[in-house]
Image (tube, rainbow, N blue to C red):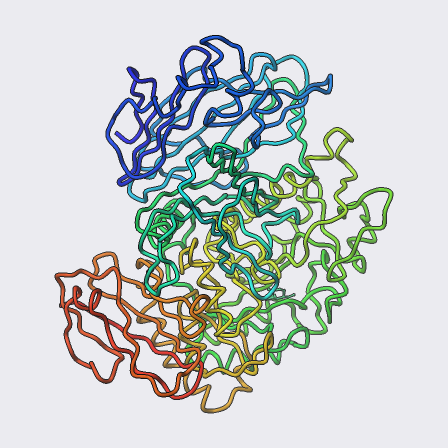
């Protein structure tokens, strides 16, 4: 049984295959305490870990020092304003203006499945039951449900929170996190992902100091800059050494949400840690009328004693099996060619069909027409919102293009940016108030555009109907849904003053609603999310699209870092990755065409170039890359991912592998970024193989045709010869007898 109430001990216990999570009720007043999260333990009375017998004296014994108790008790969900001076998880303001809240335990339910979260993406089909702890604060008439889902096989636990105003007066929710976890500090390091445009999700390690350390976004989306994730790593997890990512204890937390977030660790005077994660409280205030409720997004928690590799495998499994939906979830995606880096805005049907014709001959399966096909958009200064085809560029419209592309045996996909409005658009001229803006200010432009106020139903309906009209007008089988600016000037013409603080979150709910409606209308559509590259690559968006464009930086070497950080949390099947032309448009680097292919094969795989203008030599390599895609994509999509070496950290070479679930097949990708003079070959130790199986090694000349035991490959390793020149790569394939 994955969820239990150990009544005798007043302990709730959530067990996954290898972990336990324990929550205790501390004596009479119903304080809920976090007892333990970590490696699996037996059904013990661990309530002593709440340390209510130690000074400061507890309220229900002598009541002489409540605030000190509040300030030290390991709350499962911390309150605010009453004496716990650490980070609060919830702030509630009353009509009188005061704040003070402490949810206390009232009752519980153990359910087979987690309840759905209204309007929000969330994991589903948990294989290990769910727990709802009904808490409340009678002074406010507030109910707080803490919801836990157990994924036994994946070793993951989810948390979310629903609050309801059961009183008679309105309340204002000024903060609501999804997770609060109090724990002992064992000298952990913190890992987060940071970045910028063209260099998303780079790993950043720091040691924990006293006080608060956090990452977050106030950009209205998860952002290029920081990521809704944090991990705590036991020291000595030996991450610096190649292959060392499979050692040590690691806690990983990520939020299934695509808007403003905060992820924070606070080290306290008592050397404990309070970890919180949820919607960023800045700019957030949600009015709860009597009877209304608010649902906080879900967070996914993992604990692994097999280092970051273990955390990654748990996240991948939950996301692959229990978050991504739709017909493409387990399906090979069509190999696409996108015209963005090929033509930018300068294209027409003739040019696109020329690219498509050449691509079809090489085995490419879908043409994606990117930005610039609508309104009078020939650069980024106009037409967003006017989703009418530009017949000057595309005579006969989308249907003529689709027919031409389909005649070549290819599918057609298109680019859309439905959340935006250009000041130079018919839409803006008709509805200037549909842009998010503050009444007293001229809103700030970014990429010459404003953001549509998706908190308004009429705006969402317009967007939905115009997108549907486009997709019904031709045989369009894929959409790249882009979002090219972050939010500013937060104001809505419709929200009343005491609901103005709801806009950020309502915007995100609007995006989710639109994508849900789109998928219901076009159930076979392949949707790829995108945001100026990878600014909204998060678990929330993966609920709607099985893949997300990783980054506008398509350089194979930069991608090693971006894809390592991305694959730390997300399955390779979700990473939009293409081969592009050189010199690379982001960094001007020239890399071998072959290496660009190897790196893109770790993701969804496609091309982002004008195939008609490639050199003969490069073009001739495409059929071979396509053969590799067809041969290995099942393994890449469904296999387990292991990190062998990190270019991000060793600055010389990168290596990772995927292993099939039955451990009969494996594929190693090795990229020698910089060659080294006068060295012998490099020895790498593989992971995840079956020690008892013997593997036929393919791709290494000196070992070609040799069968080597899994135990030897994992412990003694393989020798990888140096390659002449920089930026060279290789694939090594292994099959067991
Ligand atoms: C940003 C995307 O990441 C690019 O791939 C491209 O679609 C442009 N937007 C188009 O404006």
Label tally: 0
**Residue 94 found in image quarter:** top right
Residue drawn 62% across and 42% down?
A: 510
Q: Is residue 685 above or below residue 72?
A: below
Q: Quadrant of residue 87?
A: top right
530 sits left or right of 620 in the view: right
Q: Residue at x 75, y 61 (%)?
A: 383
The N terminus sits in image quarter: top left
Front-most of 640 and 449?
640
Tell which of 263 and 112 is nearer to you. 263
Q: Quadrant of ligand 1?
A: bottom right
What residue is drawn where x is 43% and y is 39%?
185
Q: Nearer the viewer, residue 479 or 472?
A: 479
Camera-side residue: 693 or 649? Answer: 649
Q: Quadrant of the C terminus?
A: bottom left
Q: Is residue 82 above or below residue 687?
A: above
Q: Answer left or right for 70 relative to 19.
A: right
Residue lying at the far right of the rendered structure: 440
- Residue 370 x/y as whole percent: 61, 68
Q: Residue at x 30, y 59 (%)?
A: 639
Residue 433, image x, y percentages: 80, 45
Q: Position of residue 124 (x, y in %)?
A: 40, 39
Is residue 286 placed above or below 344 in the rendered structure? above
Q: Position of residue 356 (x, y in %)?
A: 52, 77
Q: Residue furthest bottom?
A: 616
* Outermost residue, top side: 62
């Amino acid at each position: 049984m994955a969820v239990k109430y150990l009544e005798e001990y007043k302990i709730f216990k959530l067990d996954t295959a290898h972990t336990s999570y324990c929550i205790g009720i501390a004596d009479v007043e119903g304080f809920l305490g976090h007892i333990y999260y970590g490696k699996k333990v037996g059904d013990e009375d661990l309530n002593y870990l709440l340390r209510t017998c130690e000074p400061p004296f507890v309220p229900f014994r002598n009541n002489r020092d409540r605030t000190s108790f509040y300030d030290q008790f390991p709350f499962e969900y911390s309150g605010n304003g009453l004496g716990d001076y650490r980070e609060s998880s919830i702030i509630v303001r009353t009509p009188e203006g005061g704040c003070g809240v402490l949810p206390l335990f009232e009752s519980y339910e153990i359910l087979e499945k987690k309840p759905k979260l209204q309007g929000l993406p969330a994991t589903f089909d948990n294989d290990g039951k769910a727990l709802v702890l009904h808490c409340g604060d009678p002074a406010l008439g507030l109910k707080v449900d803490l919801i836990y889902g157990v994924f036994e096989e994946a070793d993951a636990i989810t948390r979310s929170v629903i609050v309801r105003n059961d009183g008679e007066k309105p309340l204002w929710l000024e903060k609501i996190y999804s997770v609060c976890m109090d724990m002992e500090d064992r000298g952990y390091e913190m890992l987060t992902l940071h970045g910028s445009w063209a260099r998303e999700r780079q790993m950043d390690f720091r040691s924990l100091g006293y006080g608060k350390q956090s990452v977050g976004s106030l950009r209205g989306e998860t952002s290029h800059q920081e990521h809704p994730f944090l991990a705590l790593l036991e020291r000595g997890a030996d991450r610096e050494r190649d292959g060392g990512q499979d050692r040590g204890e690691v806690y990983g937390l990520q939020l299934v949400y695509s808007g403003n977030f905060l992820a924070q660790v606070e080290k306290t005077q008592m050397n404990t840690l309070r970890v919180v994660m949820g919607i960023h409280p800045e700019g957030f205030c949600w009015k709860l009328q009597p009877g209304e409720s608010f649902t906080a997004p879900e967070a996914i928690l993992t604990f692994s004693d097999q280092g970051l590799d273990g955390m990654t495998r748990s996240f991948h499994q939950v996301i692959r099996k229990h978050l991504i939906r739709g017909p493409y979830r387990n399906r090979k995606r069509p190999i696409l060619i996108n015209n963005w880096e090929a033509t930018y805005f300068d294209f027409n049907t003739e040019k696109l069909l020329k690219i498509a014709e050449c691509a079809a001959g090489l085995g490419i399966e879908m043409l994606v027409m990117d930005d610039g096909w609508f309104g009078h958009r020939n650069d980024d200064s106009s037409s967003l919102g006017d989703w009418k085809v530009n017949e000057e560029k595309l005579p006969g419209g989308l249907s003529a293009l689709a027919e031409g592309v389909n005649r070549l045996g290819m599918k057609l996909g298109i680019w859309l940016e439905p959340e935006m409005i250009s000041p130079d658009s018919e839409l803006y001229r008709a509805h200037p108030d549909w842009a998010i803006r503050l009444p007293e200010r001229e809103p700030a432009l970014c990429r010459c555009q404003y953001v549509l106020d998706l908190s308004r139903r009429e705006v969402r309906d317009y967007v939905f109907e115009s997108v549907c009209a486009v997709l019904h007008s031709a045989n369009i089988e894929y959409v790249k849904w882009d979002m090219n600016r972050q939010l500013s000037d937060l104001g809505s013409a419709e929200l009343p003053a005491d609901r103005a603080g709801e806009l950020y979150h309502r915007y995100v709910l609007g995006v989710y609603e639109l994508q849900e409606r789109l998928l219901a209308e076009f159930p076979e559509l392949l949707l790829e999310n995108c945001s100026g590259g990878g600014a909204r690559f998060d678990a929330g968006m993966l609920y709607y699209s099985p893949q997300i464009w990783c980054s506008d930086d398509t350089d194979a070497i930069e991608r090693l870092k971006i894809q390592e950080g991305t694959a730390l949390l997300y399955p390779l099947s979700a990473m939009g990755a293409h081969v592009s032309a050189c010199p690379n448009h982001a960094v001007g680097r020239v890399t071998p065409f072959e290496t660009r292919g190897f790196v893109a094969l770790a993701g969804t795989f496609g091309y982002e170039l004008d195939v008609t203008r490639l050199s003969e030599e490069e073009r001739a390599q495409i059929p071979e890359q396509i053969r590799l895609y067809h041969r290995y994509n099942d393994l890449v999509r469904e296999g387990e991912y292991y990190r062998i070496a990190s270019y991000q950290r060793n600055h010389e070479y990168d290596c990772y592998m995927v292993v099939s679930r039955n451990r009969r097949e494996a594929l190693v990708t090795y990229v020698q970024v910089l060659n080294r003079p006068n060295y012998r070959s490099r020895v790498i130790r593989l992971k995840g193989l079956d020690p008892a199986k013997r593997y036929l090694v393919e791709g290494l000349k000196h070992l070609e045709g040799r069968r080597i035991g899994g135990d030897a490959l994992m412990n003694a390793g393989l020798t990888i010869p140096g390659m002449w020149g920089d930026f060279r790569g290789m694939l090594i394939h292994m099959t067991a007898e």
